[in-house]
Image (cartoon, rainbow, N blue to C red):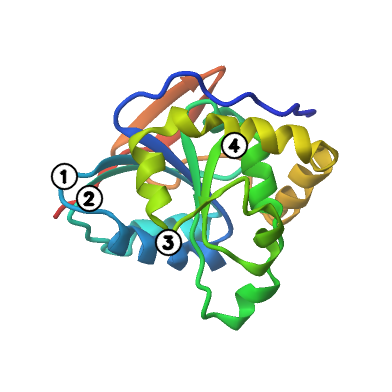
């Protein structure tokens, strides 16, 4: 499966749809971020792509937020990530800058998100800093501005894809895929609240709403 860099979306609906993808070892960073980073009155939708352990951990986390957060869960696959990127408006990559284990994390997810044409907001990991002109720091006021007016930031993705073109190749996506090499073929791991996103192929996603 060959993938070219996708142009940023020209239209963003409401609420904004965020994408997070990653291994189960990173899922707590997402949970902690969601718990602390949104306010009453905020309304977002989140798609989570991970391995089965990550999805189960997220679904059973008893996450509580003052915001209205709706989310969908699906097992990660390269094909699903590409299709879901056509739905999402932005990618978020929260981390823990106080965790020594994260200091050696690669920039693969950041480069992948930009390749997929997604505005990206991330914690400022050491490996990300050379790309700081191409993403928004999750801990800055810029993240709120990006949520409020995503289209005003599309030029950042365009510049990234132009200036970093040697990195926008299938090898990056393959490296991401290698993190999930043992995942079984796509299936939904829960039987309730079933919903479908139809984006070229039918991608089964779970639909939930967090309670205050």
User: In which quadrant of the rendered view does residue 191 lie?
Assistant: top left
Callout 4 crowding tier (Cα within 10 Å): few <14, some 14–19, many ≥20: some
Q: Position of residue 21 (x, y in %)?
A: 55, 49
144 relative position to 5: left or right: left
Q: CA distance from mark 4 to mark 3?
A: 18 Å
Q: Mark 4 highlights which residue?
A: 156
Q: CA distance from mark 1 to mark 4?
A: 28 Å
Q: Earlier in the sequence, mark 4 or mark 3?
A: 3
Quarter of the C terminus within the rendering: bottom left
85 relative position to 69: left or right: right
Helix, strand or loop for disc 1: loop
Q: Is residue 1 above or below residue 33?
A: above
Q: Mark 3 highlights which residue?
A: 139
Q: CA distance from mark 2 to mark 3?
A: 23 Å
Q: Nearer the viewer, mark 1 or mark 4?
A: 4
From the viewer's side, name the closer residue of 57 and 109: 109
Helix, strand or loop for disc 2: loop
Which mark identifies residue 210?
2
Q: CA distance from mark 1 to mark 3?
A: 19 Å
Q: Position of residue 104 (x, y in %)?
A: 70, 73
Q: Earlier in the sequence, mark 1 or mark 4?
A: 1
Helix, strand or loop for disc 3: loop
Q: Mark 1 highlights which residue?
A: 41
123 relative position to 68: left or right: right
Q: Position of residue 54 (x, y in %)?
A: 49, 59
Question: Looking at the image, how many numbered discs can be counted on the residues?
Answer: 4
Callout 2 crowding tier (Cα within 10 Å): few <14, some 14–19, many ≥20: some
Which mark identifies residue 30?
none
From the viewer's side, name the closer residue of 61 and 150: 150
Q: Nearer the viewer, mark 4 or mark 2?
A: 4
Tell me the residue at 35%/30% (across/down).
195
Q: Earlier in the sequence, mark 2 or mark 1?
A: 1
């Amino acid at each position: 499966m060959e993938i070219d860099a996708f142009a940023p979306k020209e239209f963003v609906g409401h609420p904004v749809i965020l994408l997070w993808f990653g291994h189960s070892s990173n899922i707590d960073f997402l949970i902690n971020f969601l718990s602390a980073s949104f306010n009453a009155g905020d309304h977002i939708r989140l798609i989570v792509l991970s391995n089965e352990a990550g999805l189960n951990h997220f679904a059973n986390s008893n996450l509580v937020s003052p915001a209205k957060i709706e989310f969908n869960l699906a097992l990660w696959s390269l094909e699903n990530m590409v299709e879901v990127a056509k739905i999402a408006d932005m990618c978020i990559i929260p981390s823990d800058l106080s965790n020594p284990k994260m200091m050696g994390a690669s920039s693969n997810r950041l480069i992948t998100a930009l390749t997929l044409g997604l505005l990206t907001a991330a914690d400022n990991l050491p490996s990300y800093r050379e790309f700081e002109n191409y993403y928004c720091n999750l801990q800055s006021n810029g993240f709120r501005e990006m949520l409020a007016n995503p289209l005003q930031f599309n030029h950042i993705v365009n510049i990234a894809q132009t200036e970093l073109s040697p990195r926008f190749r299938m090898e990056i996506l393959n490296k991401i895929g290698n993190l999930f090499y043992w995942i079984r073929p796509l299936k939904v791991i829960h039987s309730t609240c079933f919903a479908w996103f139809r984006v070229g192929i039918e991608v089964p996603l779970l639909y939930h709403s967090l309670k205050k």
